[in-house]
Amino acid sequence: MLGAGDTAKSFLGVEASLSGRKWVGPTADIDRHASAMAQQTGLPGVLCNVLVRQGVTPETAESYLAPQLRDLLPDPRSLRDMEKAAQRFLQAIKNCERIAVFGDYDVDGGASSALLLDYLRSVGLRATLYIPDRIDEGYGPNAPAMASLAADHDLIICVDCGTLSHKALAAATAADVIVLDHHLGGETLPPALAVVNPNRQDETGDLAHLCAAAVVFLMLVEANRQARAEGGATPDLLAMLDLVALATVADVAPLIGVNRALVRQGLTVMGKRARAGLVALSDVAKLDTAPSSYHLGFVMGPRVNAGGRIGQADLGARLLATDNPHDAAAMAERLDVLNTERREIEAAVRAAAIEQVESRDTSAPLIWAAGDNWHPGVVGIVASRLKETYNRPAIVIGFDENDGKGSGRSVSGVDLGASIQKLASEGLLSKGGGHKMAAGLSLTRDMLAPAMERLSDLLEKQGAGTAGPADLKLDGMLMPAAATTELIEQLENAGPFGAGARAPRFAFPDVAIGFAKRVGETHLKINFGDGMGQRIDAICFGAMETDLGKTLLEHGGKRFHLAGRLELNTWGGRRSVQLRLEDAAFA
């Protein structure tokens, strides 16, 4: 795939913007291939730049802009143990067995659990939902919970967890156990009837980018196939893709291949407002536009997560699974309140973590911080913020007396989960695991220094620490008159955008600011043009907390290069072009 940013030349000559970043434009190769694509297809040049950057050719452009799930969905049976898992699942349904669903407490675990509960409800069965408490039980199955569930159920399905839970699954002696997971597997599998996981060590890795909800969805596809082969009726799985889309984006799975098609179709389903929990969540968040991948990742996902982070662990999963609008409204309100509390707790931990990080070498391969009584429900979010700020893998750990629980987030090209798992196998951690971009760990105070030193060495060997502050990567240059609603709609067809498929960003060169005003406490709204007639509104969130906002607010008639993402702003039934401003530089 052709990439952007592999040239040292700055775009528009911006070596250090108002936010201190270098602007990097398309490479000469991308420009050349995009020009050829535009001539062959008649598509706008800036759209072709985006497509070429994502590995699209002129021959595949049409199908890429209109992906069909049926063409991209893999054969579920390509995953080991899939047929066995689906067969046992259908057997439990046919015999009206007692089924329990054990899920993780994050969005992916909640959505995975809700998929199974929804499917079972559609065939007239109820299942027991069990989500462990983050603080009291920690991540994944534990022996007491599994033994208790096994005593009262015939089948336990572990979703988004279980691949490394050998002792816990061994405790479920009175029930069959199926694991549907995506976390990195170990050398041996746990004692389960079936372990379906694209990240098992004996898998090809072709589907390693799937989140757990996508794995659950594939199991249900296989279950429907087997049921139809026996002449049985099957639930409508396409109606469940809203849950798969939410989990895929919230779990930061790369939006490539089938993931992209799952999210696109899921957003369409979500737009029909048929799922009580997601409708309530949209309403409490005051969403007044069609959902996008941004809303899944930054509006809905954090609210679903809030219960598992600082409140009732199963609240998010129950919200996603309920078909009762009144119950959904109450749960969504509670999650919204918890999310506000989560933000306050996160802000305090983030400030303390940054102070600690800044006292060390921020150019090291690993950024890490640890503190007493840091809430385990927010350490992962803080790690994500540190990773974004320093462009390094980051670990944040909260200690309760001698025991610490932490979370880590990685940068592209650095497999954090494998390194964490290696530390655990070497005895430098009490427990640890995850996937490439995110991981969790447990350790004691004595383990902290040697573990972080060893982890830093492992990550350095993968190339961590070689990158500087994140450059702003742009897909080209636009004049205001070219930024039309039609262009934005065409760009949206190249999406959805997120992990593994960054959103298109463009620069508007040498423009004048017509007006600038503060919006709320920290945001900035401006209007700009190039003197040729067309003017565009722009919004920059959080701008007033930085020099960027202050400089633009007090522009004094100076001209600027502006950069950001184009979006459609809907107000009063009318649609207009708006720039989500991310950076600026003096022209």
Image (cartoon, rainbow, N blue to C red):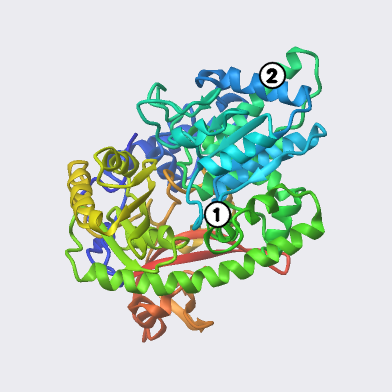
Residue under pointer 2 = 225
Residue under pointer 1 = 133
Q: Amino acid at mark 2?
A: Arg
Answer few, some or many: residues within 10 Å of disc 2's Cα (few below 14, many 20 plus, some between 14 and 19). some
Name the image quarter holding residue 268. top right
Q: Amino acid at mark 1?
A: Asp
Say whether residue 99 is visible: yes
Residue occupying the point 73% across, 59% down: 280
Which labelled disc corresponds to residue 55?
none
Report the side of 16 relative to 281 (left or right): left
Q: Position of residue 73 (x, y in %)?
A: 57, 26
Q: Position of residue 241 (x, y in %)?
A: 65, 39
Residue closer to the observer: 316 or 283: 316
Residue closer to the observer: 447 or 299: 447
Q: Secondary structure at mark 1?
A: loop
Q: In the picture shown, does residue 229 fall above or below 182?
A: above
Residue closer to the observer: 406 or 411: 406
Report the side of 113 relative to 561 (left or right): right
Q: Position of residue 427 (x, y in %)?
A: 26, 42
Q: In the picture shown, does residue 121 fall above or below 21?
A: above
Answer few, some or many: residues within 10 Å of disc 1's Cα (few below 14, many 20 plus, some between 14 and 19). many
Residue occupying the point 23% across, 51% down: 451
